[in-house]
């Protein structure tokens, strides 16, 4: 994981904290100890959003070979997969540099 420790105080920033930040619209991640705020860098936000929408772009192609029900299940599983993985994909930078 790329954001596991606070740059200033070394406090651990957990997966859940990052996950909650993503789920609440990429809110800044705050260190519990020293209150340093971390921004999620914009291209990484975009990567996650595009990644989550990926099955939508391929919808027509997928529906040629799979039933709509199966496509829905696949799209939901993909979304969950991306969301669970996203805290590992992100990079952040400190607000007050
Ligand atoms: Zn800290």
Image: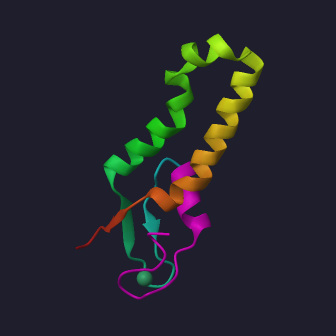
Location of residue 39 by image quarter:
bottom left
Q: Ligand 1: give its quadrant.
A: bottom left
* For residue 66, above or below residue 33: above
Q: What is the residue that sits farthest to the front in this orientation?
A: 65
Q: Decide whether residue 3 is among the magenta residues.
A: yes
Q: Is residue 46 left or right of residue 66?
A: left
Span highlighted in magenta in the image: 1-23
Quadrant (top left/top right/bottom left/bottom right) for the C terminus: bottom left
Q: Residue pushed farthest left?
A: 97
Q: Percent position (x, y) of residue 57?
A: 49, 22
Q: Position of residue 42 (x, y in %)?
A: 32, 49
The furthest residue to the right: 69
Where is residue 15, by image quadrant? bottom right
Q: Is residue 70 above or below residue 84?
A: above
Q: Position of residue 30 (x, y in %)?
A: 46, 70
Q: Residue furthest bottom?
A: 9
* Image point (62%, 53%), residue name: 84
């Amino acid at each position: 994981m790329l954001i596991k420790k606070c740059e200033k105080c070394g406090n651990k920033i957990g997966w859940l904290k990052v996950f909650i930040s993503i789920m609440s619209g990429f809110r800044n991640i705050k260190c519990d100890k020293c209150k340093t705020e971390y921004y999620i860098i914009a291209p990484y936000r975009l990567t996650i959003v595009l990644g989550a929408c990926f099955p939508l772009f391929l919808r027509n192609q997928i529906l040629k070979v799979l039933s709509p029900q199966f496509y829905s299940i696949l799209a939901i599983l993909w979304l969950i997969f991306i969301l669970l993985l996203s805290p590992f994909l992100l990079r952040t930078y400190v607000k007050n540099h």
